[in-house]
Image (tube, rainbow, N blue to C red):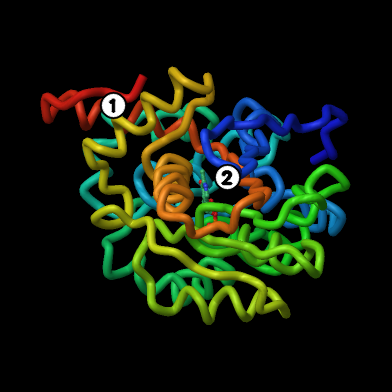
Amino acid sequence: MEIPKVKIPIQEISLEKNIKLFIKREDLIHPQISGNKYWKLFYNINNYLETQPKNPLIITFGGAYSNHISAVSALGNLSGIKTLGIIRGEELEQKWRDNPTLVFAKRNGMNLKFVTREEYRHKDKLTEFLQQEFPESLIIPEGGTNKNAVQGVKMMLNNDTKDFDYLCTAVGTGGTLAGISEFCEENQKVIGFKVVEDSSLENKISELTSKQNFHLTDAAFGGYGKINDENIRFINDFKVKFDIPLEPVYTGKMMQKLFEMIDTDYFPEGSKILCFHTGGLQGIEGANLLLEKQNRNLII
Ligand SMILES: Cc1ncc(COP(=O)(O)O)c(C=O)c1O
């Protein structure tokens, strides 16, 4: 993978308050390996390829609509590396054709292995087994989060991001937050918007960063992947007003929660806030299919 030559734009989101809010459009970094996925994979892949495996194979884990699975499959396709996705939910074996993320992954040549939720919960065992079965393979954890990912996230920070008081990101497995926290400026505060209730998250993040400059906020809105109508309205209004697309699992929830925090004066007057658009827009198609079935408003 290469460091893209284009500069990632930082756009202002104008507010009526005396708060400056900006969004860094990491979603624009690559059409298929978007946002934080690009950076979390960067060193994982490059370090692996440096070992010159004879038959490179990348194995990774994810749920039915996983942005990470989508990105790894695209990377495999673009670089001619075989990929295997271990997918949560054995029922999807019959239904993957109804799921745009899995169809995309298959089209990219990814082999999909569907496992029960119980098996998926014991990913460590599965990883051990797979590493024995495919000794030359690179096994990347769920969400791409590991120490290499944290190093890659450093590249989301540069001179343009130094001048902000707060840095915000959505949090799934925590690698992105850990990287921002580890490599941001001493005076910057980091806010992670949790989209999944996981009591071990804070510890996991602390294992990946030596810093304690981060604060985790709940933006779960009823649980991981749950889409609520108010959030859809927010995402659609946001798109109309600022011409920036958000998706309902991560960035939409982060931004809605952030707006609530701004409204309730969490941030002192004059604060400069930067949030990272971590991509994942591929998930909108799958979300809309579900919403359509439920006769609900769609994401535009
Ligand atoms: C769009 C999007 N935003 C945020 C995250 C959260 O990143 P992390 O798992 O590193 O916490 C993810 C997951 O990779 C994601 O796909």
In depth, the one of 11 and 246 nearer the eye is 11
**Residue, x 48% and y 31% (percent of image)?**
281
Any atom of ligand 1 within 8 Å of the CB at mark 2?
no
**Residue, x 47% and y 73% (percent of image)?**
201
Q: Amino acid at mark 2?
A: Thr
Mark whose residue sits in front, 1 or 2: 1
| Image location of residue 271, percent across then percent down | 65, 52
| Image location of residue 154, percent across then percent down | 78, 56
Residue 141, placed above or below residue 299: below
Q: Please state, as top left, top right, bottom left or bottom right, where the N terminus lies in the image.
A: top right
> Residue 83 shows which numbered tag?
2
**Residue, x 23% and y 41% (percent of image)?**
228
Please give left or right for residue 91 compared with residue 129 in the image.
left
Q: Residues within 10 Å of mark 2 (few under 14, many from 20)?
A: many
- Considering the numbered disc 2 on the image, is that residue within a helix, a strand or a loop? strand
Any atom of ligand 1 within 8 Å of the CB at mark 1?
no
Q: Please state, as top left, top right, bottom left or bottom right, where the C terminus lies in the image.
A: top left
CB under 8 Å between discs 1 and 2 = no
Q: Residues within 10 Å of mark 1 (few under 14, many from 20)?
A: some
Q: Amino acid at mark 1?
A: Asn
Mark before the other along the chain sequence, 1 or 2 = 2
In depth, the one of 287 and 142 nearer the eye is 287
Residue 203 visible in the current orientation: yes
Residue 57 visible in the current orientation: no
Residue 210, placed above or below residue 2: below
In depth, the one of 230 and 61 nearer the eye is 230
**Disc 1/disc 2 C-alpha distance (Å):** 27 Å
Identify the residue position indicated by label 1 in the image: 288
- Considering the numbered disc 1 on the image, is that residue within a helix, a strand or a loop? helix
